[in-house]
Amino acid sequence: MRAGLIFLVLGYVLSQFYRAFLAVLTPALETDLGATSADLSYASGLWFIVFAVMQIPVGEALDRIGPRITAVVLFSLGGAGGALVFALAQTPTHISYAMVLIGIGCSPVLMAAYYIFAKMYPPVMFSTLAGAMIGFGSLGNLASSAPMAWAVEAFGWRETMVALAVVTLLVSIALWIFMKDPPKQAATGPRGSVLDLLKIKALWLIFPMMFVNYAPAAGLRGLWVGPYGADNFGADTAMIGTMTLVMGLAMVAGNFAYGPMDRVFGTRKWVVFIGNALGAIGCFALFALPLQGSVWIATALLALVGFAGASFPLMIAHARPFFPEHLTGRGVTLLNLFGIGGVGVMQIVTGRLMAHWDTTMASGQAYSFLFLFYGALICCGLAIYAFSTDRTD
């Protein structure tokens, strides 16, 4: 099981990479394929939406057939296959097709690990293990910044994507060899569906916060940092790589920091609440930052948003005690649906908003209103989450 978890972490490194690498490819795809920021926003949004929709069948598969087959089949066909389609793309539409396939492929990896944590480790350790999984997996977030920019400049983006397809396939093969399923419950045990989870009233005060908490950090890191740096500061590919690297490091640190905080402070709800309030403050500070101001101040504020937006695993830990034991897989994937689905919806929404603001506002102002939008979004989620029931193990 230990070796299997190591390769699951490697799979999640790739998942984190694939959700964020488009920001660095913006200049190359614009030159070679004529892809605009709106095109890439749409493609990135499709990744998140498909990933989110897949959580329902993935949850069913985890509970019924186990994480091993679920992860291997989807990750090899969707992940490796989608990366290869990306490498062969000739139009922005082909990029969208590729991102859909990659989203399908990445959809089971994190939840397979969370399913194993929930089934085989003490409940009090769940948030720490969940945070560590995302923390180590966020190395993929880092790899999609400066290292990806270097690889694209050294080898070309098509060659780099072919190499990634091969790596994804190799990780899938390793998962098939080393990963094992947790012991299954007796077939005579209780049965149910995701509809039973939707009847739990306590979860409905957590869902809205889950929907918005990751959207600003993922949206900015995965897409808008690149255009923002280029348009507002004249940043080249190397500088964009540095900005995304700093924000990615902050997100890694945030995942490790959030993990044990429920045991340190004896609460999950208020750790999440205060952390996301700091993220909203970071967004509002970016909104107030003068146009063409200091690129380093902007990068520091983006890092704050990334750090504060890493509450995703602690939110799943908050909701997990409300799940019946036999619906563990469907429970964690339902939460993931809201978390990743929110990112996908907001990627598409912000793409449309930015296209409108670019035509109606002075140069650079659109990004200020993007930050204002993200800050207000977090505040809406916090207003509902404040009434949720705190729960620890």
Image (cartoon, helix red, strand yellow):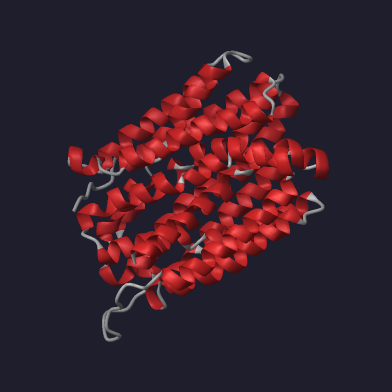
In this view, 268 is above or below 146? below
Q: Nearer the viewer, residue 214 or 238?
A: 238
Residue at x 68%, y 30% (from the top left corner): 237
Outermost residue, front side: 154
Residue at x 77%, y 54% (from the top left corner): 89
Q: Is residue 231 left or right of residue 293?
A: right
In the rendered image, residue 284, in percent from the top left (x then y), is placed at: 48, 23
Q: Nearer the viewer, residue 202 or 49?
A: 49
In the rendered image, residue 320, in percent from the top left (x then y), is placed at: 29, 57
In this view, 251 is above or below 84? above
- Give the quarter of the figure containing the N terminus: bottom left
Q: Is residue 353 left or right of residue 130?
A: right
Q: Is residue 207 left or right of residue 146?
A: left
In the rendered image, residue 115, in percent from the top left (x then y), is placed at: 35, 64
In this view, 4 is above or below 146? below
Q: Quadrant of residue 220?
A: top right
Residue at x 19%, y 37% (from the top left corner): 265
Q: Is residue 114 left or right of residue 96?
A: left
Let me know if residue 61 appears in the view.
yes
Let me know if residue 197 appears in the view.
no
In this view, 301 is above or below 390? above
Outermost residue, bottom side: 188
In the rendered image, residue 235, in percent from the top left (x then y), is placed at: 67, 23
